[in-house]
Amino acid sequence: MSFSTTLETPQTGKYEQPTGLFINGEFTHGVDKKTFESINPTTEKPICAIQEATEKDVDIAVSVARKTFEETWRKVTPEQRSRYLLKLADLFERDLDTLAAIESLDNGKAFSMAKVDIGMCAGCLRYYGGWADKIEGKVIDTNSETFNYTKQEPIGVVGQIIPWNFPLLMWAWKIGPAVACGNTVVLKSAEQTPLGALYAAKLVKEAGFPPGVINILSGFGKTAGAAIAAHMDIDKVAFTGSTVVGRQIMKAAAGSNLKKVTLELGGKSPNIVFNDADIENAISWVNFGIFFNHGQCCCAGSRVYVQDGIYDKFIEAFKKRAGANKVGDPFAQDTFQGPQVSQLQFDRIMGYIDTGKKEGAKVEIGGERHGDKGFFIQPTIFSNVSSEMKIMQEEIFGPVCSIGKFSTEEEAIKLGNATTYGLASAVHTSNLNTAIRVSSALRAGTVWINQYNMLHHQLPFGGYKESGIGRELGEAALANYSQTKTVSIRLGDALF
Ligand code: NAI
Ligand code: MG
């Protein structure tokens, strides 16, 4: 069997799409030879069938990853680990258009935006390639009788479970630091968007990684995902997705081998606009903050708080701006917003829109589906949204913005923090002191000032409160993929 099929996109023409599980450097079928279909959210039609991993395939991939870790990968020099990652980054750039087109096909994201994602993947892989041979310990002086040093060692076999909203970016964020630190990986992609991860697996092979260092499984959460979380021979699990599943992963880790856990979960991030903000700029960033990636961002600026002096003017201008966002075919050049990823997500979001209407919030624009085919939803803005309303409290994960009003800085901070989440936040003001005071008071892992959604592989990203545990990106991620060993050598005579 070839485990590959020919697909076509408007941007790339025909290309070869791998469809197997990627284990030990080869594409293969699952033990049960089951397959499932990935859906194109623009047409609602299946794209192709791919092999489905079950618990048995997780077992096989983990034993391969363990063997590779012990027998091969541990002996590979940090410099060589660096070279593999740098090469992989180059290959992502070489195949940028194909990878971006796969994202548009499988996830529905606008092709122009998908290209930015892939550029960021390459940036992230290259950045961690740069780190691989700079992960160092310390010599620690305690007294003249001992010589002490620390080493940063890999954790071992790492299980990674990623979501569908940034299929390849999450792949790169997870694999880059794990491999740089010397771990081997079993990664499960999201069932809605398995195609990019498999194409990237082909690039892993081309980059020359020893077989078994990076293993990629397509499959479902309740089966393959749960098997990763509960596996007795996985040393660490890293998860990005819903808070509900994040809790299950922690429980499964606690109930099995107490594997280390990092979680990057949901958010309901506040985007706060003060009277003295440059209003045109603020509107651009608020628009991008919520409607970028069709609102399917863990850090989306979904709660917008506007100060009373500019509230009415802001709403009028924001309506115009959001109304001009082009919704449609992800492959059309001027498209900003494509379809939501799945029927399930579409239904969830439409449910929240109904709730907002019933709760008495005012629909400023949108509030309906867009067109009659594909999972498209109109950019939707609710104003007069009070703190208790569900649409101000719960993560909607769609193109739905909830706006409230505030008078004082103190009130803005209080509203901003009035959530169980703490992933991101933003402040728009021309006053430096306001910006610094408010950013210090907000309980969130990221605070953007006069911008939004501007992630960078050098900058740590992760959640306060129920938005997660640990940090991704930057030097901070290395701490989540390595462990400190202390070696203490006796120089002096026996003490006891
Ligand atoms: P999800 O949390 O169910 O899925 C994310 C990943 O976890 C997928 O790979 C899935 O297969 C896996 N998974 C699901 N159940 C699992 C289990 N029991 N054990 C191990 N792995 C499991 O998220 P879903 O249902 O796709 O989206 C629901 C909501 O989650 C969204 O509406 C959004 O609010 C939030 N979400 C947040 C994301 C983020 O970036 N933080 C990304 C995706 C969703
Ligand atoms: Mg799909």
Image: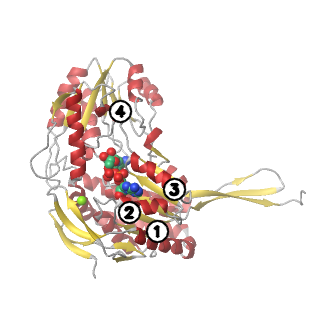
Which amino acid, by three-letter code, is at mark 1?
Arg
In terms of sequence position, does the residue under pointer 3 or pointer 2 come before the other?
Answer: 2
Residue drawn at x 34%, y 28% as measured from the top left: 272
Front of the two marks 2 and 1: 2
Specify the quadrant of the image occupied by residue 163.
bottom left
Residue beneath disc 2: 223
CA–CA distance in space, label 4 to label 3: 31 Å
In the rendered image, the vertical position of residue 144 relative to residue 60, given as above or below: above
Which amino acid, by three-letter code, is at mark 3?
Ala
CA–CA distance in space, label 1 to label 4: 40 Å
Residue beneath disc 1: 83
Residue beneath disc 4: 270
Q: Residues within 10 Å of mark 2 (few under 14, many from 20)?
A: some
Which amino acid, by three-letter code, is at mark 4?
Pro
Considering depth in this image, is 77 or 51 the residue closer to the camera? Answer: 51
Q: Which numbered circle lies on residue 253? A: 3
Q: Quadrant of ligand 2?
A: bottom left
Residue 125 in the image: state x and y as whole percent.
41, 60
**Does residue 296 appear left or right of residue 322 in this picture?**
right
Residue 191 in the image: state x and y as whole percent.
30, 60
CA–CA distance in space, label 3 to label 1: 33 Å
Specify the quadrant of the image occupied by residue 203.
bottom left
Q: Residues within 10 Å of mark 1 (few under 14, many from 20)?
A: many
Residue 38 in the image: state x and y as whole percent.
24, 63
In the rendered image, the vertical position of residue 61 relative to residue 337, given as above or below: below
Front of the two marks 4 and 2: 2
In terms of sequence position, does the residue under pointer 3 or pointer 1 come before the other?
Answer: 1
Kind of element beneath mark 2 = helix
